[in-house]
Amino acid sequence: MGLIYLLIYTLAESTGKTIDKLNFARNRITSLQLMLVLFFSISVSLLLFITLTKQPFPHLSLISITLMAMIALVSFGANVFDFVSLRLNDLSLREPLVDFEPIAAGLVGYILFPEERKPIFLAAFVLSAIIVRWGTRRRKLRKSEKKGMFYLLMAVGFYAILPTLYKLSLVHISPVYIAFFRTAAVFLLMAMFFPAKSWKGFSGKKATYGLLSGVAYAIGTTAGLYAIKALGVVLTMVFMLLGPATRYWASHFILKEKVRRGEMISSLLLALIAVAAIFA
């Protein structure tokens, strides 16, 4: 069942990112508008699911509340850095560095959870890091782009901590409630810290695309949490190495974007490494 959750996560995340790219290209949505509408859409989708399926409210303790607060703050920090990076760099420039996220998260889990350690997984993460670096080695960046990539690197670092916090929280709270509390808290924090003028020029088309990708992310986030609960952090992150291949192929065939050959090759190699590590 855990592998089914991982497959759902991978497909849902790739769907969400593809819709987001269409929203940027066709509707010229700003990165802040996108993040606000996404977190609103994800929160509402999860709340509807909780209500319709009558999910029992979790028993809250000091430990669970502390963990949820940490998840909300780390996620908010990651999304703020992500937002700043989006303003400075285009998506094609950011995407290769985003590929480091499951690698970093997997290494954190490998260090902190001895019961999940397998040499094949460590080898997969090390090889994947080398391949991602190879795929981006020829990029020449302007000063503003270097600044944007620094912020994205900070965001990736924050994102890499979240799966470990998720695993610790899953002992106390169900996956769907973790997903809801996290996204609702981040939406409220972003709405508080960013000005109302962020909605200037917002349109129905932007909202529609944002709501659709938000539903996809809601499905993907929940499935990813169920996968971590069933399989652990490390194996889940190994499987998520398949994500870049699905995103790049979607960019090439659906969005008709020009994807660099190095990125296509590196994403396919990551997929091969993930399959080999999972079924070894």
Image (tube, helix red, strand yellow):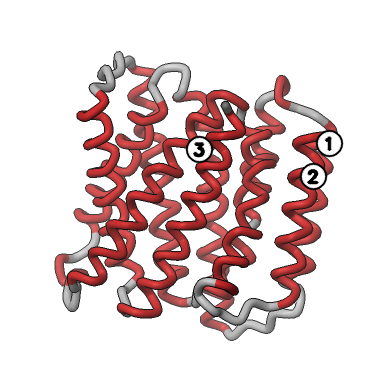
Residue displayed at 61% across by 66% down: 248
Relative to 109, 81 lies left or right: left
Give the mark toward the camera: 2 or 3: 3
Are the residues flagged by discs 1 and 2 in contact, CB closer than 8 Å? yes
Residue 34 location in percent, x, y? 32, 64
Relative to 86, 61 lies left or right: left
* Quadrant in which the N terminus is drawn: top right
Badge 1 or badge 3: first in the primary sequence = 1
- Residue linked to disc 3: 224
Comparing 52 with 109, the one in front is: 52
* Quadrant in which the C terminus is drawn: top right
Residue displayed at 79% across by 60% down: 131
Residue displayed at 79% across by 39% down: 277
Badge 2 or badge 3: first in the primary sequence = 2
- Residue linked to disc 1: 120
Residue 146 location in percent, x, y? 58, 76
Q: Amino acid at mark 2?
A: Ala
Residue displayed at 53% across by 35% down: 5
Name the secondary structure under disc 1: helix
Residue 232 location in percent, x, y? 61, 27
Name the secondary structure under disc 2: helix
- Residue linked to disc 2: 124
How far apart, in angstroms, are the residues tagged by discs 1 and 2? 6 Å
